[in-house]
Image (spheres, grey):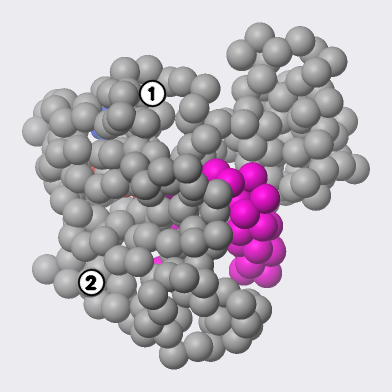
Amino acid sequence: MTDGTTSRAATADRTDNTPAARVVDLVKDFGGGVRAMDGITFDIPRGELTSIIGPSGCGKTTTLKIIAGLAEATSGRVEVNGVPVTRPGPDRAFVFQDFALMPWATVLRNAAFGLELRGVPRKEREEIAKEYVGKVGLARFENSYPHQLSGGMRQRVGLARALAVDADILLMDEPFASVDEQIRRRFQEDLLRLLSDEKKTVLFVTHSIEEAVYVSDQVVILTRGPSRVSKVVRPGVDRSGGSDSIRRSPEYLDWVEQIWSELQSYLET
Ligand SMILES: Nc1ncnc2c1ncn2[C@@H]1O[C@H](COP(=O)(O)OP(=O)(O)OP(=O)(O)O)[C@@H](O)[C@H]1O
Ligand SMILES: [Mg+2]
């Protein structure tokens, strides 16, 4: 295993070592006896990519929504830069599992929507949105509508929207779930590149162990619901050798195996 010195995080321009956010003893009851989370605690280090992995229904989306300020915890708290979260804020941007695009608006307007909500004047927000639509490879489609795009392209619009608002923390709920493996791998590279360019902190939900190991500095493994943190690991694989050699490296395969056995212990019981 590496000591993390070759991970992206090590080169990020960090001003201090305090976590960007902390999730402290989060409990969520939905009524009717449904307890989604039963005391989840983990830190989200600044400038790093943390992923959450766990069985379907264990509360990953709910956790992200509470961090975003879009849902309330039954007990426990989330702190962003040391301040308890009570509502959405410009420091956090959410990429939804189901895109949440406006079907009547163009790609450009959808990408600019976060800025529109913040009252950024039209010309300025369109300029910024244009830049990010280009970065996610959709420049030719800026005047298209969501129904004219594939699922993967719609997800890229969601990503452009989140990047355009320039939030420090990106909350991404299975952003690459509906694309084929080839495009997924391209996205992973795009994401890693954007992260190192833009120095964001990312919390990323995925069902793919391989994806988690490939992109993450830290992986939070949750148990089945009512969920708790089963384990936090720090793969931080050495990315200097290029994508194919990383995916074949003993270090990478070992992390995939470790996370798989941790998850399996919950899937089988
Ligand atoms: N608004 C709601 N009302 C009632 N129950 C809810 C609500 N939202 C989520 N739940 C329940 O809370 C639990 C966690 O849901 P959540 O969507 O957070 O899971 P998840 O880990 O994101 O699942 P998946 O991997 O399938 O996306 C589930 O049992 C779900 O049925
Ligand atoms: Mg979910």
Name the one closer to the observer, 231 or 196.
196
> Residue furthest toward the right?
140
Residue 131 percent location from the top left of the image: 81, 36
Residue identifier under label 2:
262
- Is label 1 in contact with label 2 (beta carbons under 8 Å)? no
Decide: is 220 above or below 112: below
Q: Residue at x 37, y 24 (%)?
A: 69
Instruction: Please identify the quarter of the rendering in which residue 88 is found.
Output: top left
Decide: is 110 above or below 254: above
Q: Is residue 255 left or right of residue 102?
A: left
Residue 109 percent location from the top left of the image: 76, 23
Residue 14 visible in this rendered orientation of the protein: yes
Residue 57 percent location from the top left of the image: 28, 48
Q: Is residue 156 left or right of residue 225?
A: right
Label drawn at residue 70: 1
Q: Residue at x 90, y 43 (%)?
A: 140
For the magenta stretch, what is the residue range? 181-210
